[in-house]
Image (cartoon, rainbow, N blue to C red):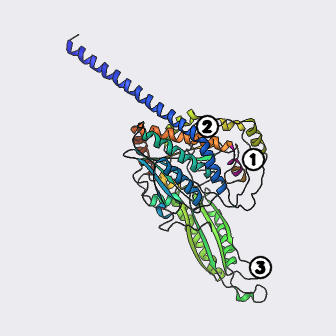
Amino acid sequence: MPFKKIATTTLFLSLLIWGQSQNVKNESSIKLAKETAKNILNNAWPSDKATSLKLWDYAEVGFKEYKSAALHVAHLTEAGFKVETGVAGMPTAFMATYGSGKPVIGILAEFDALPGLSQEGIPEKSIIAGKNAGHGCGHDIFGTASVSAGIAIKKLIESGKIKGTIKVFGSPAEEGGGGKVYLVRAGLFNDVDAVIHWHPGNKNEVTMKSALAYKSAKFRFYGISAHAAAQPEQGRSALDAVEAMDNMVNMMREHIPQETRIHYVITNGGKAPNVVPDFAEVFYYVRHPKRDKVVEIFDRVVKAAEGAAIGTGTSMKFEVIDGTHDLLLNKTLADVMQVNLEEVGGIQYTEAEVTFAKKLQTSLLGTIPPLDDAAKVFPLKIEMSSGGGSTDVGDVSYMVPTVGLSTATWVPGTPAHSWQAVACGATEIAAKGMLNASKTMAMTAIDLFTKPVIIEKAKEEFKKQKGEYQYKALLGDRLPALTYRD
C-alpha cells in the first residue's frame, strides 16, 4: 500500500476515534449534569413541598395572586435571578432571567386557583369555612415545580456545566384570564428558542394532544326597573334579555360544527323577584379546535345577544375577557422529553396513600382507572383530537417551539376542576408528582442547552406547523382583564 494512502487512512481512523471519544465525553457530561440537577431537586423537595402547601392555602384566583407570585419571586431573587415584576401590564406576572447568550430556554409557571372549589385535604367532600377558592387544577404545584426546575438549571449555568440563558415566566390567570396571551403580545418570548411547561394530572405522559382554541366575553344587558306586579308594563327586563340570548344560542347549537363547545353562567340576574331587573350579565365561553372557527362562532353568539336586546327593548354591551389559540405540538421536543420522563419514572404510593386514593375513588363517576396507573409512564402518543380544555400555552406555542408533560399528581381517574383534585393537592401524592415534573423539565432543558441540533430541528418543525399564519391575539388589543374574577 502506498505511503500516502496509509497516512490518509490512519488520519481518517484517528479523526473517527477522536470524534467518538468526544461524543462519549459529551454524553458523559450531559449525564453528569442531569444527575446533578436531580440531586439539586431532591434536596429542594422539602422546601418545595412547603411552598406548594402555602400556595394551596392561599388559593388566590386569577390576577389576584399577590402572595403566590411574591413567594415565587422571592425564591427566584434569592437564587440569583434578575426578576422583572408586573410585566405586560399584569401586577402578578413576572419574568426571571439568568445567564447569557444562546440558547434561551423558557419555563412556564402558573399559580392561580379556581373560585367555588374550597376543599380540605381529605378524601371526602368538605368545604373549608370562610374560603371560596381552591387549586382544582393544581397550579400551586405547577408554579412551584417550574420555579424549582429553573433554579436547578441556573445552578448548572453558574457552575459552568451548561451555557446559555434560562427564563422563568410567571403567568397569572391561566383560568380564563389569558395571562400568557399578554406576555406573548408584549414580545417577551421573541428571543426564546424553546419553551417547557407541565401540568398536574392523573397520569404520567408527554403532551401530544392539542387544546381547544376559545374566546370568552361577558354580555351585559341594561333595561328599566319597575314593580314586577303593580307596573310591569313600565319595565324592560335585562334578565329577559339574558334568557332570550341563552335560548337563541342553545338553538344555534344544532347548526354549528359538532366539535364546538359553548357554555355560560348567569353572573347577575337581578336582586329581587318583585323588581324588574334593570341589569343582568351572562358570561360565555366559545371553544373549537380551530382558532378561525372560534372567531366565526363567537360572532354569531354576539348576533344572538344583539337580537335579544332588540326583542326585549333593552340595550347590550359586551366585554371580551379572554381568547386563546389551539396548541401547536412539537414531536421533536416531545421525543426528547419522553426519554427523560421514562428515566424519571412514575409515582409510588405508600400504604397510607393507597388508603387515601381508594377512599377518594369511591366519589368518582364513570370508569375508574387502576391505582397502578400512577406508577406507569405512558408511551408517547399523538392524538388527533383536541381534548376538552383550553390553555393560554397555545398562544406561546404559536411564537416558539413548545413542549409539555403531565404527571400523576392526582389519584387516577380524578377530573381537573374538582374538589377531589383540590384534596389531592395537599398530599404527598401531589408532591411526588411535582418532583417528577421538575426533574423531567430540568433534564429536558439540559438536552436543549447541550444539543443545538434538537433546537434546530424543533424550529424547522415549528415553521412547518405554523405555516404562513401571522399570530394575532384572539382577545384583541384589550388590556388585561384584571377584575374578571371580581
Disc 1 or 3, which lies upstream in sequence? 3
The residue to which callout 3 is attached is 273
Horizontal side, residue 465 vs residue 249: left or right: left
Image quadrant where one finds the N terminus: top left
The residue to which callout 1 is attached is 366
Disc 2 or 1, which lies upstream in sequence? 1
The amino acid beneath tag 1 is Gly
Outermost residue, front direction? 78
Answer with the quarter of the image where residue 7 lies.
top left
Q: CA distance from mark 3 to mark 2?
A: 54 Å
Residue located at (57% from left, 57% from top): 174
Q: Secondary structure at mark 2?
A: loop
Is the Cβ of the residue at disc 3 closer than 8 Å to that at disc 2? no
How far across and how far down the image is residue 289, in percent? 56, 55
The amino acid beneath tag 2 is Phe
Residue nearest the observer in this picture, 140 or 336: 140
Q: Secondary structure at mark 3?
A: loop
Magenta stretch bounds: 422-427
Residue located at (57% from left, 38% from top): 43
Residue located at (67% from left, 81% from top): 278
The residue to which callout 2 is attached is 378
How far across and how far down the image is residue 246, in percent? 67, 70
Outermost residue, top direction? 1
Neighbour tally class for label 3: few under 14, some 14-19, many 20 plus, Cα within 10 Å: few
Residue nearest the observer in this picture, 127 or 444: 127
Could one spot residue 380 in this view of the protein?
A: no
Position above or below: 319 against 6: below
Horizontal side, residue 471 vs residue 369: left or right: left
